Amino acid sequence: MVKLAILGFGTVGSGVLEVVRTHGPALARRAGTGLEVGYVCDIRDFSARPDAHLFVNNIDPILQDPDVRVVVETIGGLDPAYFYVKSALESGRHVVTSNKELVAERGAELLAVARAHGVCFLFEASVGGGTPVIKPMHECLSANVIQGVWGVVNGTTNFMLTEMERRGVGFDAALKTAQALGYAETRDPSADVDGIDAQRKVAILASLMLGRHIYPADVPARGIRDVTPADLAAARKMGRAVKLVARAVCGEDPLHPAVEVAPMLVPRPGPLADVDGVYNAVMMRCDMLGDVCFTGQGAGRLPTASAVAADAADALRQGTAVHDTLWWAEALPLPAGGSWAGQDAADWYVRLAGGPAPAGAQALGDGAFLVRNQTEQDLRRALAGCTVANWMRLLTE
C-alpha cells in the first residue's frame, strides 16, 4: 500500500479523494499496488471532518513521509502550485496535476525535472478534463505524425453558444444562465469567454504535437463576446455552426505552425459542430490513421477527478518510462510582438457596423459578407476602412 497526497481540496481535489476511496481495488489493479490517500494539504480549517487527521496546512509533512509516492496537485494557478510541484518532483515523487496554467507555462521545465529525478509528471486532466486526449496523443497515436489538432475545449463557451443558437438569446443572457448553473465564474468569467482557458489548453496540445514548448502568450486568442444571434443565424444558413475553436496546425513547415483560439464557422454536420452544451471535442489529423475525434465532458468534479486518479495509477505502473513519448523540449518565447498566428488562406465571415464592404465581398444580408481566399493579414488590410463588428474564419479542416 502506497500513499497519495492531494494538494488543494477544492472541487477536483475532493473528487480525487472520493474516486480513490470508491474505486480503490480497480486503481490497485491498474497501479500494481494498493493506493490510499495519506494527506490532504489545504490552508483552510477542516478539523470538523471525520477524516480531519488527513489534513495538513503545508507540504513539509508530505515531503518527509517516505511512503508518499504520488502527489496530486489541484490548487490551480502558478503560486504556490509551481513551487509545490517542483519540490515534490525533486524529492523523487511522481506528480499528477489538473492545472492547465501550470502545464502551459512551465510544462517543459517540469517534464525535464521529472525525467532527471526518475519520476513522472502527468497532466491528462489539464486539457480534456474527464475526456482522454493527452494519453491517446502520445501513446495510442505514436505510430503517426500528428499534422493538426482542432478542438472545442472550453465547456462554458460551448454551453453559451448552444444557448444562444437554440434560444436566440444574446451573449449577456447566455452568460447569466451559465453563471447561474455554475458553468461560468460569477466574479470574472474572462478566462472562459475571452479564450484564455482554451489558449492554455491548445498551447499544451501544440507543445506535445511539435515537441517544443509553445507559450500561451504567443498564441493569439479571441473569445465570444462579439458573437450575436445574427451571426449564429447567418452561420446556420450557410450550413455551419459557430464554435470557439482552438487549433494547432503544422502544415508543411513545422517551424511556423498556426496556433490560435477564435470563434469560427465549422461545417455541419461534423465532429466539432455536433458537440453541444458543456461537452468538448478534440479532433486530430494523423498521417496514417486520418482523422480521429475524442468527445466527452471537459470539466466537472468527478469526470476530472477520475482522469487525475487514473494518472496516479499510471504513474505507479509506468514510472519515468512514460516520458519516452510524453515530453517536449524547452524553448524561448517568441520575440516581443510575435505570435503563432497562421497565415494560411481561408474564407471569412465578416459583419460590418459601418463603412464600405471590402472589394469582392459577397453580401449575405444584414451587414454580413463573405470574403474568400484571404490570409488573416490580407483580410485585416481589406477591412482597414471598415467598422468591423465581428469576423470569423470558415473552417474547412
Image: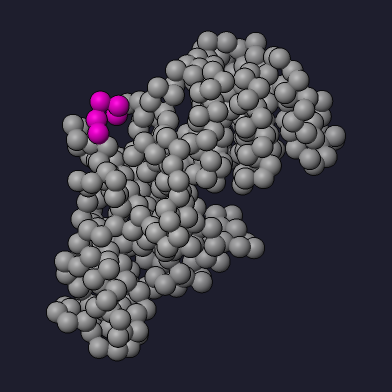
- Residue depicted at x 80% and y 42%: 44
Residue 148: x percent and y percent? 27, 44
Is 65 in front, or is 92?
A: 92
Asked if residue 331 lies in the magenta stretch, the reply is: no
- Residue depicted at x 29% and y 29%: 141
> Which residue sits furthest left?
360
Residue 167: x percent and y percent? 41, 68
Q: Is residue 63 left or right of residue 215?
A: right
Q: How many marks?
A: 0
Residue 65: x percent and y percent? 74, 18
Residue 105: x percent and y percent? 52, 45
Q: Classify residue 388 by image quadrant.
A: bottom left
**Would you say residue 104 is visible in this rendering?**
yes
Is the residue 329 above or below the residue 39 in the image? below
Is 190 in front, or is 10?
A: 190
The secondary structure making up most of the magenta span is: loop
Q: Classify residue 283 by image quadrant.
A: top left
Q: Is residue 352 left or right of residue 326?
A: left
Is the residue 29 above or below the residue 198 in the image? above
> Which residue sits furthest right?
47
Is the residue 242 above or below the residue 201 in the image? below
- Residue depicted at x 42% and y 53%: 334
Asked if residue 142 lies in the magenta stretch, the reply is: yes
**Would you say residue 168 is visible in this rendering?**
no
Segment colored magenta: 141-145
